[in-house]
Structures are given as structure tokens and as C-alpha cells.
Image: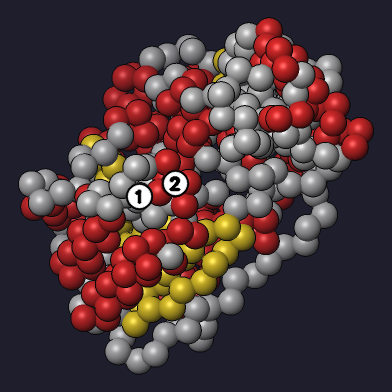
């Protein structure tokens, strides 16, 4: 089978791309405005290149702090590093982005475009927090630029991912305009809500996915193979990670237990015997007291803590009757609730489920919940890593999409 070429727009740290690369797709370019996320992408492209060349020890030397990032990148062909384009997609930049992608393409055909614009403009939470409910926000219309890429490169398929709020934002005007625009430029589309937990991700994360086919005939969303829901957070996902105390930073450390079935079949653990970025934030005494109450309530009664139930001396917010679920414990015996970018600001909504480790989850634990492999390194420090992880598409869900798209490109019916 020929190598399937794709472009990733609004690529973030590369969760969507990771799933497609895992299934044999070859990236032409990643376009992303955030520098830290682009640095993460470059480092990950270095991983894939060195893996292909049988030189992974050079990548792991970087994780072990035996070499610098610049020396790692210097081992990679300039064309691969340059394929990560650090630019905001806008009217002012789009022609230059086209030029950079054209240089990468060298007259090769683009088979697929993937990606979704930043979700804040469509997010229900984002709209509730914005006094103008995101009216007039330029991010509402980034899909028009997405369509310009479709018009220029004419891929056979595209995959557009976004939050559930896309279905209702602006009384559906953005979604309707989007679908009409895609139709005008020659794409038949279908939409489906996917839940990450159906594809091996130990997280309840629902997303809108639109698949478009460059064909005037009616397109039906293909079936994606689902996996059994037999795994648990604490028993299967976190079981081999060292214990942490608040503020502790294990930048590089060994696993505490041998690999298990879940970590093996999901490719979470690999040949590298160390885990990186197992770091958590410091908490003040008040937060630790609240975390302990929340943990005890969830582990012993399976009840969520409500803010207005806290002892008076622990309630510091004036508006006590809103956002009652300010503090939330990860379910150890099931699946996590959705990881979002707000985890970069505080860990209150992602409390570790253990009364002997009263803290919020670590960077590596958040990455595992999102199904990133342990050798995926997030550049930019703790806060930047949390933001990149929260914004990402889980690679396992992306891989399920990639397998389906690969079948379609090979002529199979949806």
C-alpha cells in the first residue's frame, strides 16, 4: 500500500497525528500557533524518524538528559523539523503557510487533512464564562480557513474534530454554515459523536467528528471498531507509577512494577524502562484539607463533594451556590471524567484517588488518561504540558479513526 500523506491543522501537541502515524500515515505538515506545542511536535517527529532509522537510543538519551534538545533536533533532516509550522492561521499568514506546505509536498498528493480549530468558541463552558457568549470571537469562523486548505489541496477525505458545543453554538449557525461550505467546495459529509472510552481510552470524553469525502454522492459515517470496557484507572493505568507527594517532581524515574496487559496492548509502555514527567504541583494546606475530604467521600461513599458542604472555614468563595463541583476525584475503579486544558491552571478537578497521596494528578498521569505513550515528551514545562495534554485528541481514538480512513482510501465501503 502506498504511503498515505496528510496535513494536520490546528495540530496542538499532536494527539490526533500520533494516532494516524501509528496506523502508517505520513505527515506532510503540522500547523500550530503555540510554540511549546510545536516544540513538542518537533521532538515527537524526532522520535518517529529515529525509530524508523533504528536509532531510538539517541532519542532516549535526550529523555535521560544526556543530550540537549538542539542536539536531538540536529540529528533530524531539516525538512522534517521545518514541517512543523509555528503560525496562527489567519488572513495574513495563510499564503505563507501554503508556500511552506508546498515546499514540503514537492508535487506529492495530499490524501487527507485532519484537525479542528480551537474549541473555546464552541465550548459550552467557554460560552458560559464569556460575557458576550463568544459572539464576535474570530475563532468562531476558523473553519473557513480549514475550507481554504481543502480547496487548495483537494484531499480525498478530511477529519474535523471538535467539542460537543459545536452542535449548538450560535443556534447551530456555525455548524450549518460549515457543512454548507464543505458541500460547496465538493465534499459530502457526515457527523458523529464519538466517545473516547469506546476505543480503549480510560476517559469519558465525547467529541463531535465530521468526516468529509471529496464526492458529490451521499457519504455515511463509517463504523469504527470498539474495544471491550474491562480496564480501570488505578488497577490498570496508574498501577506501575511511583507514589508522589504534592510538589514532587520525578522528571525521570523507573517503573515500580512490570508491564501489564493494558499498558502493553495500548502501547502506553514501550522498550524504554523509564517514565518521564511524573510531576505534580504544590498545594496549600487549605486545598489539601479539601482534597482529603473529597477523596474520603468518593472512596467510601462514592459521592462527589459539593462546595457548600465544606466546613465554613474552608469556603473562601463568595458565590457558594454555583460551580458546586469545584473539586473532583478521579474514579479509581472506572474511567476518568474529561481532561481539559483548565488542568494547567489548578488541579482541583483532577484529584488523585488515594488517601495516602493527597494531591492532584501528575503530568504523566494526565497524559496516560489521554492515552499518550510514556515516551511522548511534552516541551515547555509543567503548566505548558498540562495545557497541551488537556487540549489534545486521545491518540487511541485517533488511531481508530485512522484505521477506518485507511480502509476507505483502500476502497472499502463505510
Above or below 169: residue 359: above
Q: Residues within 10 Å of mark 2 (few under 14, many from 20)?
A: few
User: At x 61% / y 56%, what residue is drawn?
Assistant: 196
Compare residues 142 and 110 and report the one nearer the observer: 142
Q: Which residue is mark 2?
A: 128
User: 390 and 226: which one is in front?
Assistant: 390
Q: Which residue is the extreme one toward the bottom? A: 217
Q: Disc 2 versus disc 1: distance between alpha carbons?
A: 6 Å
Along the polypeptide, which appears first: circle 2 or circle 1?
A: 2
Q: Secondary structure at mark 1?
A: loop
Helix, strand or loop at disc 2? helix
| Residue 334 in picture, x, y percent from top left | 79, 46
The residue sitting at 63% across, 9% down in the picture is 284
Residue 355 in the figure: left or right of residue 40? right
The residue positioned 52% from the left and 83% from the top of the image is: 414
Q: Residue 157 location, x and y as percent?
A: 35, 72
Q: Look at the image and tell me in which quarter the N terminus lies.
A: bottom left
Q: Which mark is residue 133?
A: 1
Tag 2 and tag 1, C-beta contact below 8 Å: yes
Instruction: Specify how the rendered protein is coloured.
Output: secondary structure
Residue 365: percent from left, percent from top: 65, 31
Left or right: 355 with respect to 78?
Answer: right
| Relative to 294, 350 lies left or right | left
User: Is residue 68 among what the camera can see?
Assistant: yes
Along the line of sight, which residue is nearer the eye, 217 or 103?
A: 217
Q: Residue at x 37, y 34 (%)?
A: 37
Position of residue 263 relative to residue 359, above or below, is below
Q: Residues within 10 Å of mark 1 (few under 14, many from 20)?
A: some
Amino acid at each position: 500500500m502506498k504511503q498515505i500523506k496528510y496535513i494536520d491543522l490546528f495540530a496542538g501537541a499532536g494527539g490526533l497525528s500520533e494516532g494516524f502515524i501509528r496506523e502508517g500515515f505520513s505527515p506532510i505538515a503540522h500547523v500550530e500557533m503555540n510554540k511549546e506545542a510545536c516544540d513538542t511536535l518537533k521532538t515527537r517527529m524526532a522520535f518517529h524518524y529515529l525509530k524508523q532509522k533504528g536509532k531510538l537510543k539517541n532519542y532516549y538519551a535526550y529523555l535521560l538528559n544526556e543530550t540537549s534538545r538542539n542536539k536531538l533536533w540536529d540529528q533530524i533532516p531539516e525538512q522534517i523539523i521545518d514541517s512543523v509550522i509555528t503560525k496562527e492561521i489567519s488572513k495574513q499568514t495563510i499564503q505563507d503557510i501554503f508556500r511552506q506546505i508546498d515546499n514540503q509536498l514537492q508535487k506529492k498528493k495530499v490524501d487527507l487533512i485532519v484537525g479542528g480549530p480551537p474549541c473555546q468558541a464552541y465550548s459550552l463552558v467557554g460560552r458560559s464564562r464569556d460575557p458576550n457568549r463568544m459572539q464576535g470571537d474570530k475563532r468562531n469562523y476558523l473553519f473557513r480557513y480549514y475550507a481554504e486548505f481543502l480547496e487548495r489541496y483537494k484531499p480525498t477525505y478530511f477529519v474535523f474534530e471538535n467539542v460537543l458545543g459545536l452542535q449548538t453554538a450560535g443556534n447551530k449557525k456555525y455548524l450549518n454554515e460549515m457543512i454548507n461550505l464543505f458541500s460547496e467546495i465538493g465534499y459530502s459529509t457526515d457527523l458523529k459523536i464519538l466517545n473516547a472510552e469506546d476505543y480503549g481510552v480510560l476517559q469519558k470524553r465525547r467529541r463531535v467528528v465530521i468526516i468529509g469525502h471529496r464526492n458529490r454522492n451521499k457519504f455515511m459515517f463509517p463504523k469504527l471498531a470498539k474495544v471491550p470496557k474491562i480496564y480501570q484507572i488505578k488497577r490498570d493505568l496508574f498501577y506501575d507509577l511511583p507514589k508522589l507527594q504534592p510538589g514532587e517532581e520525578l522528571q525521570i524515574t523507573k517503573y515500580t512494577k512490570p508491564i501489564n496487559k493494558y499498558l502493553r496492548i495500548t502501547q502506553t509502555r514501550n522498550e524504554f524502562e523509564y517514565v518521564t514527567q511524573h510531576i505534580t504541583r504544590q498545594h496549600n494546606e487549605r486545598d489539601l484539607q479539601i482534597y482529603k475530604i473529597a477523596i474520603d467521600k468518593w472512596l467510601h461513599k462514592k459521592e462527589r463533594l459539593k462546595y457548600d458542604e465544606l466546613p465554613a472555614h474552608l469556603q473562601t468563595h463568595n458565590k457558594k451556590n454555583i460551580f458546586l463541583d469545584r473539586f473532583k476525584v478521579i474514579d479509581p475503579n472506572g474511567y476518568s471524567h474529561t481532561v481539559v486544558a483548565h488542568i494547567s491552571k489548578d488541579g482541583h478537578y483532577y484529584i488523585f484517588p488515594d488517601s495516602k497521596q493527597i494531591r492532584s494528578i501528575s503530568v504523566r498521569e494526565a497524559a496516560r488518561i489521554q492515552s499518550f505513550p510514556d515516551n511522548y515528551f511534552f516541551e515547555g514545562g509543567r503548566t505548558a504540558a498540562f495545557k497541551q495534554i488537556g487540549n489534545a485528541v486521545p491518540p487511541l481514538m485517533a488511531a481508530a479513526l485512522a484505521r477506518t480512513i485507511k480502509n476507505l482510501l483502500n476502497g472499502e465501503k463505510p
